[in-house]
Amino acid sequence: MFRKITSNRDPGKTLGSELKREFGIYFERGGKKSRHLLEKYPRQVFALMVIAMLFSGVLAFTVMRQQQKPILKVKNAPQSTASGFGQIIGTANALQALWATQQQVDLLLKKDTLTHADSLTLNHALTQMESLRALIQKSRPTINNSNH
């Protein structure tokens, strides 16, 4: 079906070996200069690394922090004082919010990896889903199975 293609490539020559042959001199020079710098100024380099880590930590917890997106604010459905139609509307609103939250959870779970913000959003969404389910269960009318 397909013809076999033979290669005339030398098996000893690989991309890595060719890059090393071409640019190895520059890497050796850079390594020697950095080693010389580290041996000559070890405390200053160490202090610079510590300062860089502290600066990174400050940035991570202040400036670079992303605002958490609100999932969906749900107004509490009318409590037991509401009758009939009000209860139906409250339950419908709770079901609609539950469905929207479930869609958001599904989108987050389809991701290969979750960021910290995604994890917090997922945790908040699951908590909200539990409270919505409890609200829906509370607003359900109880059916009396007594035979009269």
Image: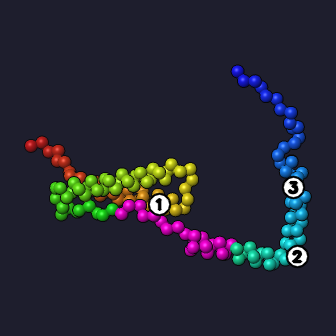
The kind of residue on which mark 2 rests is Lys
How far is the residue under mark 1 from the one under mark 3? Answer: 47 Å
User: Count the marks: how many?
Assistant: 3
Pick the front one: 47 or 7: 7
Q: Is residue 95 visible?
A: yes
User: Looking at the rendering, which quadrant does residue 46 occupy?
Assistant: bottom right
Q: Quadrant of the C terminus?
A: top left
Dot in front, 1 or 3 = 3
- Circles 3, 2 touching at the beta carbon (< 8 Å): no
- Tell me if residue 82 comes above or below residue 53 in the rendering: above
Q: Which residues are magenta?
A: 53-73
Q: What label does residue 23 carry, if any?
A: 3
Q: Is residue 133 visible?
A: no
Decide whether residue 60 is among the magenta residues.
yes
Q: Going 41% across and 61% down the picture, which residue do you hit?
A: 71
SS category of the residue bearing label 1:
helix
Q: Quadrant of the N terminus?
A: top right
Q: Earlier in the sequence, mark 1 or mark 3?
A: 3
How far is the residue under mark 3 from the one under mark 2? Answer: 26 Å
Q: What label does residue 40 carry, if any?
A: 2
Q: What label does residue 55 carry, if any?
A: none
Q: Position of residue 29 (x, y in %)?
A: 89, 63
Q: Position of residue 41 (x, y in %)?
A: 84, 77
Q: What label does residue 121 carry, if any?
A: 1
Pick the front one: 34 or 54: 34
How far is the residue under mark 2 from the one under mark 1? Answer: 49 Å
